[in-house]
Every structure is written in structure tokens, then in C-alpha cells.
Amino acid sequence: MGETVIKAENVGMEFNLSQEKVDNLKEYVIKFLKRQLMFQPFWALKNVSFEVEKGDRVGLVGLNGAGKSTLLKLISGVMKPTEGSIDVNGRISPLLELGAGFDPDYTGRENIFLNGALLGHPKSFLESKFDEIVEFSELEEFIDVPLKNYSSGMRARLGFSIATSVHPEILILDEVLSVGDAKFKEKSQQKIKALLDGKVTLLFVSHSIGDVKNLCNKAVWLQKGRVITYGPVDEVCEKYDNWIHEKTV
Ligand SMILES: Nc1ncnc2c1ncn2[C@@H]1O[C@H](COP(=O)(O)OP(=O)(O)OP(=O)(O)O)[C@@H](O)[C@H]1O
């Protein structure tokens, strides 16, 4: 048995979904204050338990809304589970919503420090990595321009460059292999492959079974917030593929 780096035990995540159609914010606030909003509790994840060992590359597969991104957010610590526990042992670099903490009024330069701080990097570390981040993003000319003047691809490039500037022990990828234009996509895939050459533990969400098989040795199949199966990637992907095939014929 290897060293366990992630341990999820009976994890449950409950969201409250508004049952009523509210057309605008004013109406929402009035209904909220009058306590007229009806909320329906909804479990996006329920009784999820699994362990990931150091060096494992785990793919998360499942249909839209199965709970894959929610599980990654819980493991990254972006959200806390409603019930159960998640223990993580190692430095995590989540490539979830790239540049989620960006401020549009700040320049690219300022956002590198802002976003880097949100990812837990000290200022001295960011100063030492600054040139590398800017060079990889290819945004030298725009680095002193406010982010509101960037295209969405440019923002994603900056977010990707910041998040991959560290050498993480646990890498979390949520379909970010397709960042930016074709040229940057190729470059970002190479960067991820280089990160994976180290002894990194990977959690990877994708709708591409080919990509999952390519990158991972294990897989979790999630369905309506529950683990259907967890094991060797080929076995899990075959079961999932067969199930999809049965559903569509
Ligand atoms: N912040 C939230 N508030 C309310 N419901 C949410 C929230 N985040 C996710 N959900 C719900 O939780 C369920 C799981 O969503 P999640 O994004 O984890 O699915 P997913 O498997 O990643 O889907 P996809 O393949 O479409 O990306 C969905 O029904 C979604 O509507």
C-alpha cells in the first residue's frame, strides 16, 4: 500500500435550489425579505468515500451534473462539505476556475500578486516567479493594462500561467487542457505533461474518455452525486462506456 494523500469519508454536499422563478434581483430581495422564497434541499454529493494514493492519477467521469466539479472544489478546499470529511496531505494546485480571484480593475501585474496570494503563495515567491509567469502567458505587452481590457482567452492564459508556476504535489485539473487558442492549448498541454513527469498526484475531470485513459491510472464514475465504481481506469471507463451505450441505443 502506498501513502494515502487524499481521503474522502462519507462526503455529502447539499445545495439549496430556489424553486421559484424570480425575474430580477429586486424581486428576489423582496421575496427573500418576505420569506416567500421556497428552497428545495438538493444533495449534489452523497456518501462519497474513496482514497487516493501518492502518485495516483485519478480521472473523474460522469454525466453533466454528476458532481465531479463539486468534488474537486471540496478537495481543493474552495468549499466545505455539508457532511463527512476530506483529508488532504500535500501541496495542492487547483486549476479549476482559472483566475477566479481576478479583479478586472487591476492590471495583469497586480492580478498576478492578487491571484497568487489567493493560491497561498508569499509575495517573495511571486516576485521570483513573475518573469516566468509573464513569459509563459505571452502577455508582456499587456501586463500593465487593466484586466477588463483582456479577452477571455488572455485572462485564462494568465490564470493558467500563475497556477502552473508552482510544482504541486497534487494537481487538480477541471477540463482546462483547452485553455486559449490552438497554439496556447498545445503549449499548456506540454506544461501539464511536464508537471506530470514529476511524482505528482493528479485528479482530472473530463468528458473525454480518451484523455482520461491517456492521463490516468484510476477512475471514479460518479452518478447523481454517488460513486458507482472506483478502480483501474480501463475497467471503470469500460463500464461507463457500456452504460452510456446501453442508454443511447
Ligand atoms: N453553487 C451551487 N449552488 C447550487 N447548486 C449547485 C452549485 N454548484 C453545483 N450545483 C449543482 O450540483 C450538481 C453537480 O454539479 P457539478 O458542477 O459538480 O457537476 P459536474 O459533474 O461537474 O457537471 P458537468 O459535467 O456538467 O460539468 C448540479 O446539479 C448543479 O446544478
Image: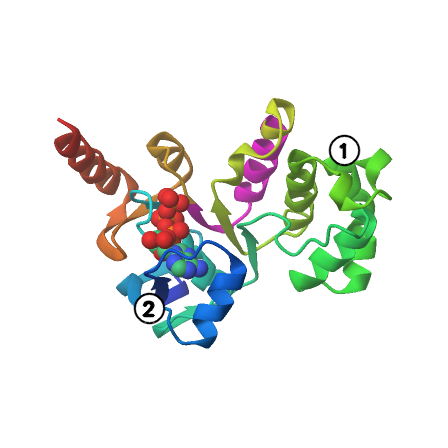
- Contact between marks 1 and 2 (CB within 8 A): the answer is no
Chain part drawn in magenta: 186-204
Characterize the local packing of mark 2: few (<14), some (14-19) or many (20 or more) Cα atoms within 10 angstroms: few
Say above or below: 142 vs 91.
above
Residue at left 56%, top 33%?
189
Q: How is the image coloured?
A: rainbow
Q: Residue 96 vs residue 243: left or right?
A: right
Q: Residue 58 vs residue 172: left or right?
A: left
Q: Is residue 217 visible?
A: yes
Q: Position of residue 185 (x, y in %)?
A: 59, 29
Residue type at mark 2 is Met
Question: Which of the marked residues, 1 or 2, is nearer the chain's N terminus?
Answer: 2
Q: Is residue 53 visible?
A: no
Characterize the local packing of mark 1: few (<14), some (14-19) or many (20 or more) Cα atoms within 10 angstroms: some
Q: Position of residue 34 (x, y in %)?
A: 43, 76
Please tell me whether residue 194 belongs to the stretch shown in magenta.
yes
Image quarter (top left, top right, bottom left or bottom right) of the C terminus? top left
Q: Name the foreground residue: 166 vs 111.
A: 111
Image quarter (top left, top right, bottom left or bottom right) of the N terminus? bottom left
Q: CA distance from mark 1 to mark 2?
A: 48 Å
Q: Residue 190 vs residue 232: left or right?
A: right
Residue denoted by label 2: 38
Residue type at mark 1 is Glu
Q: Kindly state the secondary structure of the residue where label 1 is placed.
A: loop
Label 1 vs label 2, nearer the camera: 2
Residue at left 64%, top 40%?
156
Q: Kindly state the secondary structure of the residue where label 2 is placed.
A: loop
Q: Residue 174 vs residue 97: left or right?
A: left
Residue denoted by label 1: 138
Q: Position of residue 137 (x, y in %)?
A: 73, 37
